Amino acid sequence: MSNEAKSGNGGQGEADKYFRLIAENLTDMIALVDITGRRLYCTPNYSFLGDPEKMTGTDSFIDIHPEDKERIKGIFFETVRSGIGQSTQYRLLLKDGSVRHIQSQGIAVKAPDGKVEKVIIVSRDITEAKDAAEKQKALEMQLFQADKLNSLGKTISGVAHELNNPLTGIMGFCQLLLRDEAIQENSRHREDIDTIFREAERCQKIVRNLTTFARKHKPEKTFIGLNGLLEDSLRLQQHQLDLHNITVTKELEPDLPKTMADFHQLQQVLMNLIGNAQDAMGQQTAKKLLAIKTRKIGGFIRVELADSGPGIPADCLGNIFEPFFTTKEPGKGTGLGLSISFGIIAGHGGRIWAENIPGGGARFSIELPIAEEPAPGDKKTAGAEPAALKGQRVLIIDDEQCVMDVTVRILRTLNLSPDTARDSETARKKIASGNYDAVVCDYRLPGQNGLDLFKWAKNLKPELEKRWIFISGSSGGEELSTTGRPVLAKPFSFEALQEALGEVLK
Ligand SMILES: Nc1ncnc2c1ncn2[C@@H]1O[C@H](COP(=O)(O)OP(=O)(O)OP(=O)(O)O)[C@@H](O)[C@H]1O
Ligand SMILES: [Mg+2]
């Protein structure tokens, strides 16, 4: 091309003029540098680095990000040596601290003896495309994660359901035994049974955690101020934080807008994050700091929790939100905390992410959408005194032997008169022909499910509608709660069943 320009009409000077005009009107940036890397000429669109006129003679590597500089020098001097230009990507670090991503192509300019005497560098700012690609990747990761959680959730909710039935039996029989006079007099037996009960309660908590994680129904949302929620959660952990010598600093934006959220679920997320920070700082001798910040960003409320622990190992950063991923020793962590938190925040239309803080520590950020609060509505009024239980006839409908046995025993202990049905067919016959004062009915049943049975029964005997109590393993919760009837989650306690019966038998 330059040969043509030399011999063409108008000669070299004319051609230079046109090439300069083209170069200076392209969106790409063009620089001519000597073989030591010093700039000889820069197009005006380099002005974001300074005045291009004054760049002549300056070092072309000076604005390259320190982490990329050596690599780029290597590529440049290889081009000078071999005469073969290369294409590469790197970052520029601007004076204001911001970073631009650049794609460059080097072109060797050779002297007649074949030696490289200059290099032309054609560059393009790809920062926006790169940001968009990263956002897209993050979005795909979130979708992938949500999908994986969803299928795992299905398995877990099945397992939880299976565990809730035997747990109902274990806890119910323990409570019955603890009421037995002979046991009450024998302190050793009482303590043993108490231990069994407490350990079963531990299992119940694990199963509850698993079901929260797996839960498909929508959270129960009210208007919540996150500052208050944070203060509450800190108060609950205060003792532990003091014990571990952790200093908490708070930067809570006053007048922070509210969000629509399930209080208990969000509290669970915060407790998980505070607990993790505490574990991360563990035995370290350096000062233990937990810095909490809230602020409004666009249509979102952002909560940040930053600790002064060791940070998250780089090779774990991509896994910490996965279910059962833990670096804690066996018995210390189940690896569910963050995956549960991820599910909860996603269920609120928000997002949660983690990053390491340059200089040490990890920062977890949550963003939740801002919600406008409506005018205050009516509050629910408290119920009246429960009825005395004496001889009333109660039909228990459940196909699980152990749940059936323990419920029968609890009803007898409460001086009620239980009857049983193990499937919907038998239940229908008994309801049609018998006179029951109350019904305790499982959701999952052989034949018709508990909800359909309830609808059928209230048509036939409208008085039963207000005398119906549901029990449920883990499924059907949301559907059942639309009936307005009490729903006891298995494993339910003696007291919970007693209270529900007292209410319906009023
Ligand atoms: N603040 C933090 N600093 C460093 N690493 C963290 C921090 N928070 C979480 N992690 C890492 O993420 C992993 C997963 O956390 P997650 O809360 O899901 O599970 P866990 O705390 O190990 O167990 P669980 O919460 O079920 O008791 C942790 O084991 C730890 O390696
Ligand atoms: Mg945890």
Image (cartoon, rainbow, N blue to C red):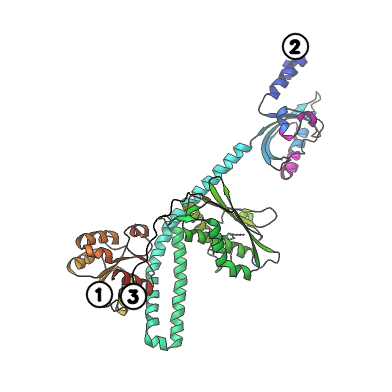
Type of the residue with mark 2: Gly
Residue 288: give x, y in percent of width and height. 67, 64
In terms of depth relative to the viewer, which is nearer, 198 or 402?
198
Secondary element type, mark 1: loop
Q: Which mark is residue 406?
A: 3
Say which quarter of the image contains residue 242.
bottom right
Sequence-wise first label, 1 or 2: 2
Q: Nearer the viewer, residue 2 or 314?
A: 314
Q: Amino acid at mark 1?
A: Gln
In the image, the segment drawn in magenta is 48-74
- Residue at coordinates 43% horizontally, 88% vertically from top-left? 186
Mark 1 sits on what residue?
Answer: 392
Left or right? Give the position of 95 relative to 431.
Answer: right
Q: Is residue 46 left or right of residue 418?
A: right
Mark 3 crowdedness (10 Å alpha carbons): few <14, some 14-19, many ≥20: many
Labels 1, 3: front one: 1
Q: Give the CA distance from mark 1 to mark 3.
A: 18 Å
Instruction: Looking at the image, tell me whether mark 1 or mark 3 is earlier in sequence order.
Output: 1
At label 2, counting other C-alpha atoms closer than 10 Å, the crowd grade (few under 14, some 14-19, many 20 or more) is: few
Q: Is residue 52 magenta?
A: yes
- Residue 448 x, y percent position in the rendering: 26, 60
Residue 333 seen anywhere in this rendered image of the structure? yes
Percent of width and height locating residue 54: 80, 30
Q: Which mark is residue 312?
A: none
Q: CA distance from mark 1 to mark 2?
A: 113 Å
Q: Quadrant of residue 400?
A: bottom left
As drawn, the residue found furthest toward the top would be 9
Establish if 434 lies above or below 34: below
Label 1–label 3 contact, CB within 8 A = no
Residue 10 - label: 2
